[in-house]
Image (cartoon, grey):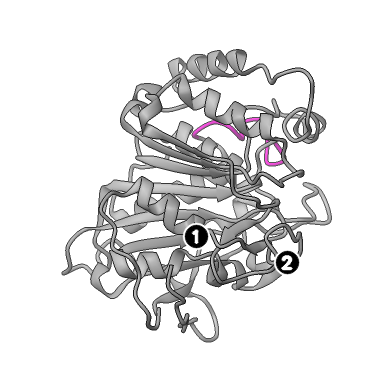
Amino acid sequence: MKNVLLVLFLAAGPALAAPSAGQLSIDPERITVSGISSGAHMALQLHVAYSDLFSGAAILSGGPWGCAENSLVTAMSRCVKESDDPLPVAPLIENARKAAAAGRLADLANLSDDRVWLFHGSQDTAVAAKVHDAAAMFYAAFLPAEQMRMVNEIPAGHVFPAAGHGNGCAELVPPFVGDCGYDAAGELLQFLYSGLAEPGDGATTGLQAVTLPGAGEANLLPTAYLFVPPACGAEAGNCALHVVLHGCAQSTEEVGTAFIEQSGYLPWAAANDIVLAFPQVEKSLVAPLNPLGCWDWWGYTGEGYLWRSAAQMRVITRWIGELTGRRNVSP
């Protein structure tokens, strides 16, 4: 991708109220999500729980749905580390089906026409390749192979791979963006949305700090970020909406807006009328302990962290409902 000068407009002073449905034009059929590491687990959880809302997901260095089974010990062992024993994906699939039948998840048949992009760096030792492969195995139970793309040949460590931005491609230092000569943001967006135009050289403006309603109820930061291309106002044509979920120690509380700026999402969104939403996790040094600001994929917000009623997913989906005008998105 061409080098792009990022000139970002950040709201001065207190965060602004998020634009309402009357201020944005978003196509409710073009809502997708992506995430890396803990954000990858959350992106998969969101996609599965709200398959009636999302039409696709991108998973970077994550594991299968429900892997942790409400246990931090399990999360940090079989859901992360290399093991001679394969992850028990079949029981996880069955658990998801039972939960959907009980109404805790959306109808899993919604996944059948979605698109899923999965990335695991060949030098990533933080999350084992077999763990990430298990995420693909989970999805394979619900959608055709041609609607999935796996990328595992890029020599990246446990970082968000970019082109022309970040640190070394395998260098695990903040903001955990690696200059890998590979534009993951562009690749995943092009897979999730067909027919995108290449970004051109020039300034990218439109990033706003906004207030995230209900954040305090879900261990999220009260300030989120929203990127709104000029063409996505109420009088414009329908735009897409893509939710981006950072990894551990990658929130604005830890790295400022460096991940948002360097990851590569903004130029593609500006060139293709895609609204970007960047919710942020609040780190905690007391109960519930979350010192790195990770998304809840093992249950620190409660036993129902996987279901549609889960605190963090409820806040995100209600926010989407506000932006799209679909007030009944979240239970």
**Mark 1 against mark 2, which lies toward the viewer?**
1
Magenta segment, prevailing SS (helix, strand or loop): loop
Q: Residues within 10 Å of mark 2 (few under 14, many from 20)?
A: some
Q: Which residue is mark 2?
A: 174
- In the image, what residue occupies the spot 53% across and 37% down? 44
Residue type, mark 1 in image: Asp
**Residue 82, how many percent across, how many down?**
78, 30
Q: Residues within 10 Å of mark 1 (few under 14, many from 20)?
A: some
Q: Which residue is mark 1?
A: 183
For the question of whether residue 13 can be seen, the reply is yes
**Residue 8, how many percent across, how many down?**
47, 81
Magenta-colored stretch includes residue 300 = yes
- In the image, what residue occupies the spot 37% across and 65% down? 269
Residue type, mark 2 in image: Pro
Numbered marks: total: 2
Q: Which residues are magenta?
A: 299-308
Q: Please determine whether, in this image, residue 21 is positioned above or below residue 193.
A: below
Q: Please determine whether, in this image, residue 70 is positioned above or below residue 159.
A: above
Q: Please determine whether, in this image, residue 324 is positioned above or below residue 1.
A: above
Q: Secondary structure at mark 2?
A: loop
Q: Is the Cβ of the residue at disc 1 closer than 8 Å to that at disc 2?
A: no
Quadrant showing the N terminus: bottom left
Q: Secondary structure at mark 1?
A: loop
**Residue 107, how many percent across, how many down?**
38, 23
**N-term-proximal mark, 1 vs 2:** 2
Q: Quadrant of residue 237?
A: bottom left
User: How far, Cα to Cα, is label 1 from label 2?
Assistant: 18 Å
Q: Quadrant of residue 42?
A: top right
Could you tell whether 59 is left or right of 272 in the image?
right
